[in-house]
Amino acid sequence: MSRPPEDQGAPITDKAQLIEWFSSAVTPRSDWKVGTEHEKFAFRLSDHKRLPYEGSDGIGAILNGLKRFGWEGIEEKGKVIALTQNRCAITLEPGGQFELSGAPLDNLHQTCDEVHTHLAQVREVCDELGVGMLGLGFDPTSTREDITWMPKGRYGIMSAYMPKKGSLGLDMMKRTCTIQANLDFESEADMVEKYRISLALQPIATALFANSPFTEGKLNGFRTFRSHVWTDTDPDRCGMLPFVFEEGFGFERYVDYLLDVPMYFVYRDGQYIDVAGKSFRDFIDGKLPEVAGHTASMGDWSDHTTTVFQEVRLKKYIEMRGADGGPWGRICALPALWVGLLYDPGVQDQAWQLCRDWTVQEQEELRNAVPRHGLAAEFRGRSLKDWSADVVDLAREGLKRRARLDYQGSDETGYLKPLEEIVATGRSQAADLIEAYNGRWNGSVDPVFEELRY
């Protein structure tokens, strides 16, 4: 989201400021929240084509239509490119993927209320325009060329740079959707353990949420093609981060990593200045001619932290980024999984004991096996289905111990039901979609637009 130029924050004079930016996010356990983000594809009901920004039924029309519910617009060069309300934001991914970045909330009951309200509002506006929203991890029919870019300056810079680093970066930008959970930490040591657990276990979440077996109207041979896309996007800013498991990892080591990740842009006076591939260290030292006269600020640092795309990302919270987009129930299941694993100290310790002796090489091999094989992947002589059962059981115990009740007296464990069904059957949604394509859909992808429409 664009930051007003007057809100760039303090100039950067010392690396200690960057470390403090992370350490300032340490939060007492009693104040922990959960944030949920989810993306979806917007398409015309008449022909299943993705929506451009412009037009009476375009993305811009949806954004403006949602203002009736009290959302306030954020503009870039006169066009609404985001909405905000009560610590929530609706933003656009490069190809018009429609994202809700939810508010930090106390419990999963509130999360699901938020999701329900958002999808109901979106459905009301979309029905009026003759368009719909689809919950999948990868666009099932569109080519890159079919999808137009959203009018956001940073995307022009990124789209020019991506092909220099990998063959699938433009697919990541235009044709993928995810569900994401954001969690707090109570100390640097707690952050480190959470990061290690979630990075090691992320392939299990990826397999459970696998939901992208189609590309351009055909089976692509993967359970989650979205996950595969990340393996050939940009090695400088993607991947498993082996240093997280090294002795001494903490805020400073992560800062050092970020300082060496090439930049994309600097935002000044309403403009994105292209510095793609340049060093943030050089920016701090005033050595970038593209931004001569501009001092690196903490606002620039905040922007830079959003331009790395690991499976788990540290900002002022920890982001879980391994899951495909999916239907309503899966949106609530993703934060339920990670809150269950990481918000009860006893269960967090059990989760760490489960994976603490996994080597970096083993983790890399598992991560690379999951996109194609999903829950059928083998790890240490067991199927990932069996490992997933252990992980979901731990999450259930963690949610049970939290004992956060809704008005009916139910705790948060119910939100794991979609995952428990997947574990019981060994079938992700991708497996069901593949079966439908080969059976009742008669080799057509088109029925997915109704069956997985929000």
Image (spheres, grey):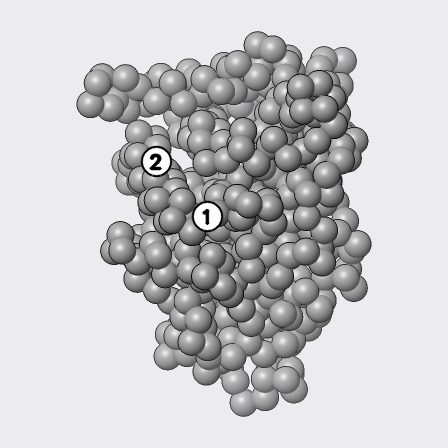
Image position of 224 (left or right of 133): right
Q: Is residue 90 visible?
A: yes
The quarter of the image holding the N terminus is bottom left
Image position of 290 (left or right of 2): right
Callout 1: few (<14), some (14-19), or many (20+) C-alpha neighbours within 10 Å?
A: few
Q: Given the image, on which type of amino acid does mark 2 rest? A: His
Identify whether 13 is placed above or below 341: below
Q: Which mark is residue 108?
A: none
- Lower position in the chain sequence, tag 1 or tag 2: 2
Query: Does dot 2 land on a helix, a strand or a loop?
Result: helix
Identify whether 150 is placed above or below 37: below
Q: Residue furthest top?
A: 424
Callout 2: few (<14), some (14-19), or many (20+) C-alpha neighbours within 10 Å?
A: some
Q: Which quarter of the figure has residue 116?
A: top left
Identify whether 194 is placed above or below 380: below
Image position of 47 (left or right of 415): right
Q: Which quarter of the figure has residue 155?
A: bottom right
Q: Which quarter of the figure has residue 402?
A: top left
Determine the CA span between mark 1 and mark 2: 20 Å
Q: Which mark is residue 116?
A: 2
Q: Nearer the viewer, mark 1 or mark 2?
A: 1
Image position of 26 (left or right of 30): right
Q: Residue placed at 64% from the left, 43% from the top? A: 139
Percent position of residue 356, x then y: 62, 26
Q: Residue placed at 38% from the left, 67% from the top? A: 74
Percent position of residue 97, x then y: 54, 51
Q: Which mark is residue 130?
A: 1
Q: How many marks?
A: 2
